[in-house]
Image (cartoon, rainbow, N blue to C red):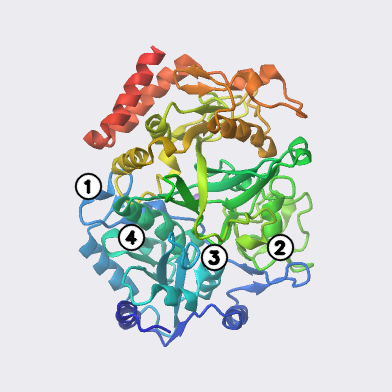
Amino acid sequence: MTKNQSVLSWLEEQKNLVQPDRVVWIDGSQEQLEALRAEACETGEMIKLNQEKLPGCYLHRTAVNDVARVEHRTFICSEKEEDAGPTNNWMEPAKAYKMLYDIARGSYRGRTMYVIPYSMGPVGSPFAKYGIEVTDSIYVVLNMAIMTRIGKDVLEALGDSADWVRGLHCKCDIDEEKRYICHFPQDNTIISVNSGYGGNVLLGKKCFALRIASHLGRKEGWMAEHMLILGIENPQGEVKYIAAAFPSACGKTNLAMLIPPEVYRKKGYKAWCVGDDIAWMRIGEDGRLWAVNPENGFFGVAPGTNMKSNPNALISTMKDSIFTNVVHNLDDNTVWWEGLDDNPPKNALNWKGEKWDYTDGSKGAHPNSRFTSPAKNCPCISPEFDSGKGVPIDAIVFGGRRAKTAPLVYQSLDWNHGVFVGSIMASETTAAATGAVGVVRRDPMAMLPFCGYHMADYWAHWLEMGEKLGDKAPKIFNVNWFRLDDNGKFIWPGFGENLRVLEWIINRCEGKADAVEAPIGYLPKPDDINLEGFDFSVDALESILEVDRDLWLQEIKDIEEFYKKFGNKVPAELKKQLEILKAKLS
Ligand code: OXD
Ligand code: MN
């Protein structure tokens, strides 16, 4: 399919290493994918679901020891350990290659080697980056066909360039003790062995689009971020775009597919999803920050997704999707998961494929069970989704789950202060019903598991981007939907009502909304947040906009400890921001 010498010689090396029985190039055609689906159903790798209720949908079960990303077995194999930084595992490249090659050697014997040319970002777009993933798993091929743009077009766009990301995936024996996800930023190479779980084996996603891409972004002057991209259209038809980073379990996919409250819908507001997980951002010709979602689908957590929490996500799963580790309803050959509805199937298999009796209290779906769905299925997918030029970002939003400390929303004083706000991002383990505050876990810019280089260098890169953007830089905000009352109950209802906060954010960007300056940044006054058609008291709003000085002084101590981890690499600007905040609070 290609004459590209760098591709052909790399593939020859991989072939000699893994020794497949045959090699199949994935051309992206429907005929080829359909044949692979049929083959996967024949071998039991996938189960064809009820094609009337769920057309084009399939079920897959991973090995029971292989159900999530494995951060402790994920390595950044940069030449120098210092370049991986204290938040990544590091292995010396030569040692890692040897170990991985020893594991991979001969592992495709009796198997097929699938060669998947894929693009992160619309093919031909100035944002796009290309990769080739070699895998021995049809499940990986079919998921990559949903999550990325694949096939012949990609090779054509690549031409004879050697600038592409090499990815080798070997299922091997799904042995946890020999499971490794290794990144070689200096070689644009990813090697993943002994796993079949999405986050470890769909190499375009976390491995390429975040870990390798963050490294490339630093080198080439752009940004790869763990962010959703959301467009808010006002009744005049103007769309403002927000990029937002949250640690896991903070409702990122829900915010990305937000449905405006009825009063807003009636006025003509609309929300458009550009992406739910990853944003690649570059400075455009106009000097502003432009973003694309490099992915082509959603790899969402199934449990908790329902017609109330996220109808757009649920509708996205109803055709051409692959479900992984959910419940199989044998009565009508469909799927189910906890939180889908109140009717667990009576005749069903759990995620392990065992007969499941929901009355015994066991979970049917794995808590990290997933759906892989084409982005174009999403009813609110942005008309700009496929636009290679991206969308201009007005606001960057950071957030976390904090029971008391962080207010509902605040705006940073400027870009550098915003970078500080991102660097101290944190989330608490879910607080107990008594209102006890959970354990704080710092997750700067939600990139802790995904930054492909030293986190302090990453902060320095953010500061540099701000310098380049100057007064065209997006404004930076922090939100917290998760304040608890004294009974441990959420005060803010979240979901669609979050648009009220986004409205203030957008108005701030346009200089149309008021705020007061507090030590931590600009805060709305309660009447700056629109409560129209919303049964929510001003007192309650006041309570979640409150900033408790003592809690913040405690927070400062925690941040100081956290920064110590990065030694003298922490940019002086961020240390200065910390000192200023401390002085303002004391
Ligand atoms: C994801 C994650 O799967 O962040 O998107 O873990
Ligand atoms: Mn994610």
Tell me the SS state at disc 2.
loop
The residue labelled by disc 1 is 82
Lower sequence index among marks 4 and 1: 1
Residue type highlighted by circle 1: Glu
Residue 267 in the image: x percent, y percent? 76, 38
Instruction: State the quadrant of the N terminus.
Output: bottom left
Q: Nearer the viewer, residue 253 or 530?
A: 530
Give the SS element for disc 1. Answer: helix
Q: CA distance from mark 1 to mark 3?
A: 35 Å
Label 3: which residue? 62
* Quarter of image, res 558: top left
Mark pair 2, 3: CA separation: 21 Å
Give residue 176's mark: none
Establish whether ligand 1 lies closer than 8 Å to the Cβ of label 4: no
Front-most of residues 557 and 221: 221
Of the residues under marks 2 and 3, which one precedes in the sequence? 3
- Residue 539 point in image, percent of width and height: 68, 16
Which residue corresponds to the image point at 39% horizontal and 67% vertical from the top-left? 193
Task: Using the image, determine if residue 358 lies above or below residue 454.
Answer: below
The residue that appears at 66% across and 26% down in the rendered structure is 491
Instruction: Tell me the SS state at disc 3.
Output: loop
**Distance of label 2 from label 4 (alpha carbons):** 34 Å
